[in-house]
């Protein structure tokens, strides 16, 4: 490995690591909300606007006003990916407010496997035997957590976590469909779509548009975390092999569970033993899948 290649690899490693670490603080951020089950749509509206705003500022800095031409190149794949990502944003918040952080985050960890499955179904991509085995192991973990949530009456939260993972997978598969699609512009579309859909749901439900100041600030902070992590990940993915990229993405899952569990943040949300066993199975599945991809040298498209 040459010095230049080595430097790029470590840059990619650091940026992917930073993205996972930044995202991991999203779960405890939601736990500080006031009346979280009342203000989901309000929170999503502010967070979506913040995601889009941060990315617009970044693109203005990077490309100037010329970035507006990217919207002409988005195409069908970008629209599908943007809508998929928007609903991932939505289902993540609802999952976090209807079940434990551990269940929602572990379900999100299955995203690489769902992405591979969608790529196989719609893009006819080859599926490795390691991916198939990992899917079965992951399914076992998912069913364990579903059983636990059914027992404690939070199965709806588990379902939201599953839908969140599928939404992220649609976004990832859309980028594999057309890698030339402007990724940051697709994310801007996702933020705007999330906010518009939230406004519609607030109007339909007859709620007021106001929410506590703490929730407004938390949603803005959370949106900044999401956008910053996506920027780091998109830059780092150019230099990092897919296997390492996939393993580092688990930092969001493990970190988020730990932050909500450890007393330092004052949340003290202790996952059940069954949830931990199910999550361990999913983490093992993703790690096994990543090892099976270790010969693949092409960086991921995200």
Image: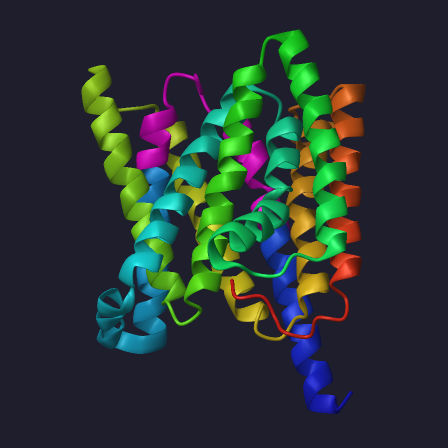
Residue at x-position 28% and y-position 39%: 195
Q: Does residue 225 appear in the picture of this structure?
A: no
The magenta stretch is: 21-45
Most foreground residue, 115 or 224 = 115
Q: Residue at x 46, y 26 (%)?
A: 94
Magenta stretch: includes residue 221: no
Secondary structure predominantly adopted by residues drawn in magenta: helix
In the image, residue 274 above or below residue 221: above
Left or right side of 120 for 70: left
Using the image as rendered, state which of residue 211 and residue 120 is in the foreground.
Answer: 120
Q: Is residue 1 visible?
A: yes
From the viewer's perspective, is residue 278 above or below residue 89? above
Q: Residue 176: image x %, image y %? A: 48, 63
Up the image or down, 68 lies above or below 266; here it is below
Magenta stretch holds residue 28 = yes
Residue that appears at 34% across and 72% down: 61
* Residue 291 locus on image (x, y percent): 79, 59
Q: Nearer the viewer, residue 113 or 183?
A: 113
């Amino acid at each position: 490995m040459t010095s230049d290649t080595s430097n790029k690899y470590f840059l990619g490693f650091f940026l992917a690591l930073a993205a996972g670490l930044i995202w991991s603080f999203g779960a405890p951020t939601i736990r500080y909300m006031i009346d979280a089950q009342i203000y989901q749509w309000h929170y999503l509206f502010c967070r979506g606007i913040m995601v889009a705003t941060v990315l617009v500022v970044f693109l203005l800095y990077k490309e100037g006003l010329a970035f507006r031409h990217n919207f002409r190149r988005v195409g069908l794949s970008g629209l599908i990916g943007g809508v998929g990502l928007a609903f991932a944003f939505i289902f993540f918040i609802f999952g976090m407010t209807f079940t434990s952080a551990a269940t929602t985050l572990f379900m999100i960890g299955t995203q690489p496997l769902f992405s591979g499955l969608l790529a196989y179904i719609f893009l006819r991509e080859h599926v490795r035997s390691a991916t198939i085995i990992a899917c079965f192991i992951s399914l076992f973990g998912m069913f364990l957590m579903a059983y636990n949530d059914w027992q404690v009456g939070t199965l709806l939260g588990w379902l939201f976590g599953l839908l969140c993972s599928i939404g992220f997978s649609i976004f990832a598969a859309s980028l594999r469909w057309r890698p030339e699609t402007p990724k940051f512009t697709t994310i801007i579309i996702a933020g705007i779509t999330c906010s518009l859909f939230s406004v519609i749901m607030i109007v339909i439900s007859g709620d007021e548009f106001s929410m506590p100041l703490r929730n407004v600030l938390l949603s803005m902070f959370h949106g900044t975390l999401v956008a910053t992590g996506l920027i780091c990940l998109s830059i780092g993915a150019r230099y990092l092999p897919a296997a390492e990229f996939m393993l580092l993405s688990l930092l969001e899952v493990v970190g988020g569970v730990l932050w909500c569990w450890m007393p330092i943040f004052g949340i003290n949300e202790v996952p059940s033993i069954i949830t931990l066993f199910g999550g361990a199975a999913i983490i093992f599945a993703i790690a096994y899948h990543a090892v099976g991809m270790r010969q693949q040298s092409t960086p991921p498209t995200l």
